[in-house]
């Protein structure tokens, strides 16, 4: 009874076992609601599983690998570009550029395809540049917020330790915010998957999971659409878990002061 | 109590006509003060100055100027008779929240301080370990700041600054929010750090009158002047200085229990209310 009350009490910290039971219960409920839903258009789990098997036979695995590598490449490039841009904002000269880039996140990719097509030599390059752009504008915004929220006392501490201003940047902004950079990366890696299907829909060369998703959607094959979405979700969760593990490995101090570890 | 024989030596820190304005509004006006080396025959004696003043009188602003973290609008702060303004790093700073680099271990934090002065890594490491031992933190060297208690964190912040600065340590509100036991320990810690070297000078910025009196040898009281009708004029300065050695109110064990001390604190609190 106490466990049930704790689940609904604000800010209560649950044991690992209770969390496991809670998650298992909620997943089961969602699954049952899905399996026995009276909504006729919603494909049943068995249909989704069957569609997944069929698509796997038709080469979904290969398409997934294509998309996964494209996304990974885009995230890697976007991370390097965005971090360099965000860190460069310590120099007043680059601040307007970074601010402008951050504002570009309101633009639609469709409207930008033409300009990127002019610059890219291959379909892969075009997809990569579209993805890097769409992830970077969010990544730069996130990192700029992280840097802006560093308290003055951290800079003071570095200066009282006789650090020059570049060393202050390295210690306070780069090393001191690595854990936050991982959090921003985690969010943007997920945004990458969201954008990926859109980009692969716009540029169909090389195929990819986004192209299949759009085709299946076009022909109203909902079971297949669900199957692809679930596969992307699983892959995304795996990637998210991997980034989380990397954060824990490189920044073991990050979780020490958190209530909900 | 017998008064301790002492004399004053060279000037260690000088605040020379410091003024500060924000948007044309004076915050500090003609602040003048100096810390001179205290010489007590036969023992190592550092200097402890307490800066007292009501909230909002510019104590923290003066603190930042003394630390070299902020330039004054006019005037100058200099240390060790240097003929130039103080630079950040020459005066150690222990802020109220005892900031440390959270991404580094205690040892890593200390090495950052030590290596700014000592280029030989082995010598720096030995210095760090010796100080950690001295302050009872040797078994904590591998922990992250988030794993330390408030008192341990305070000691770490002090050691880090001692390792880096030139005998000067500024402490911002070190008594804030402490219980009686921790307050006594902090006073002991300040005295201990001051007496590690003749040239060590600790400036404590606080509004805790009793704690400041119990630990300092000199007090600077900050406040604003009033006009003829009693209205406060903008811009604070050091309105009063007290030499507690002359009054025989320092370097005695259990000083706070003596009637002279209680009476002085009362007098100071009265002064405080007028500011």
Image (tube, rainbow, N blue to C red):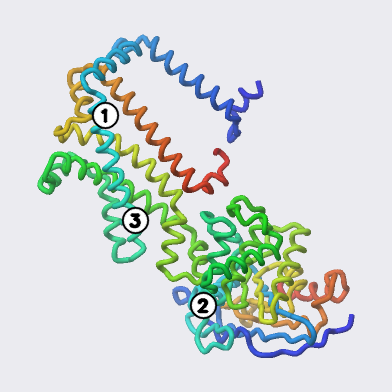
Dot label at residue B26: 2
Q: Is residue A246 left or right of residue B204?
A: left
Give residue A142's position: percent from left, percent from top.
Answer: 37, 49
Percent position of residue B126, x then y:
62, 67
Quarter of the picture holding the C terminus of chain B: bottom right
* Residue A86 circle label: 3
Q: Where does the image place residue B140, in percent across and percent down from the top left?
A: 65, 55
Q: Is residue B245 left or right of residue A57?
A: right
* Nearer mark to the viewer, of 2 and 1: 1
Indicate which disc, 3 or 1, sits on the residue closer to the N terminus: 1
Q: Are marks 3 and 1 on the same chain?
A: yes
Which of labels 3 and 2 is toward the front? 3
Up/down of A53 relative to B85, above or below: above
Q: Where residue B264 sits in the image (x, y, percent)?
A: 81, 76
Q: Which type of secondary structure does the marked residue at label 2 adopt?
A: strand
Mark 2 and mark 1 on one chain: no
Chain identity of mark 2: B
């Amino acid at each position: 009874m106490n466990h049930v009350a704790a689940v609904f009490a604000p800010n209560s910290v649950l044991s690992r076992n209770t969390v496991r039971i809670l998650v298992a219960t909620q997943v089961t409920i969602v699954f049952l609601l899905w399996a026995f839903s009276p909504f006729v258009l919603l494909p049943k789990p068995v249909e989704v599983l069957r569609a997944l098997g069929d698509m796997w036979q038709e080469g979904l695995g290969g398409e997934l690998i294509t998309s996964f590598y494209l996304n990974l490449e885009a995230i890697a490039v976007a991370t390097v570009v965005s971090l360099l841009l965000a860190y460069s904002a310590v120099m007043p000269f680059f601040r307007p550029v970074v601010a402008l880039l951050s504002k570009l996140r309101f633009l639609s990719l469709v409207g930008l395809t033409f300009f990127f097509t002019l610059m890219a030599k291959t379909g892969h390059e075009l997809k990569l540049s579209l993805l890097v752009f769409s992830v970077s504008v969010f990544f730069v915004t996130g990192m700029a917020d992280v840097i802006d929220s560093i308290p003055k006392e951290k800079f003071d501490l570095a200066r009282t330790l006789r650090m020059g201003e570049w060393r202050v940047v390295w210690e306070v902004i780069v090393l001191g915010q690595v854990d936050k950079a991982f959090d921003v990366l985690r969010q943007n890696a997920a945004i990458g998957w969201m954008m990926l299907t859109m980009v692969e829909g716009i540029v169909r060369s090389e195929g990819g999971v986004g192209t299949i998703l759009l085709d299946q959607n076009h022909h109203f094959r909902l079971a297949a659409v669900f199957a692809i979405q679930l596969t992307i979700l699983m892959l995304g969760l795996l990637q998210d878990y991997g980034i989380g593990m990397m954060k824990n490995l490189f920044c073991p101090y990050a979780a020490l002061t958190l209530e909900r570890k | 109590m017998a008064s301790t024989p002492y004399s004053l030596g060279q000037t260690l820190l000088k605040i020379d006509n410091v003024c500060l304005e924000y948007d044309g509004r004076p915050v500090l006006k003609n602040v003048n003060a100096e810390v001179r080396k205290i010489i007590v025959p036969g023992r190592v004696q550092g200097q402890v100055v307490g800066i007292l003043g009501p909230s909002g009188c510019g104590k923290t602003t003066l603190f930042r100027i003394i630390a070299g973290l902020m330039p004054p609008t006019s005037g100058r702060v200099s240390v060790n008779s240097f003929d130039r303004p103080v630079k950040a790093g020459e005066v150690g700073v222990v802020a109220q929240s005892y900031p440390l680099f959270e991404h580094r271990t205690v040892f890593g934090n200390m090495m950052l301080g030590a290596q700014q002065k000592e280029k030989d890594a082995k010598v720096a490491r030995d210095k760090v370990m010796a100080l950690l031992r001295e302050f009872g933190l040797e078994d904590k060297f591998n922990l992250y700041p988030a794993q330390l208690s408030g008192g341990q964190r305070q000691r770490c912040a002090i050691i880090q600054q001692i390792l880096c600065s030139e005998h000067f340590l500024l402490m911002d509100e070190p008594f804030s929010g402490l219980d009686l036991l921790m307050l006594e320990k902090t006073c002991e810690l300040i005295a201990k750090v001051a007496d590690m070297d003749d040239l060590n000078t600790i400036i404590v910025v606080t509004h805790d009158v009793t704690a400041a009196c119990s630990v300092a040898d000199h007090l600077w009281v900050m406040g604003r002047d009033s006009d003829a009708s009693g209205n406060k004029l903008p811009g604070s300065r050091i309105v009063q200085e007290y030499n507690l050695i002359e009054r025989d109110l320092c370097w005695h064990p259990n000083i706070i229990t003596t009637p002279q001390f209680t009476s002085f604190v009362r007098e100071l609190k009265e002064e405080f209310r007028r500011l």
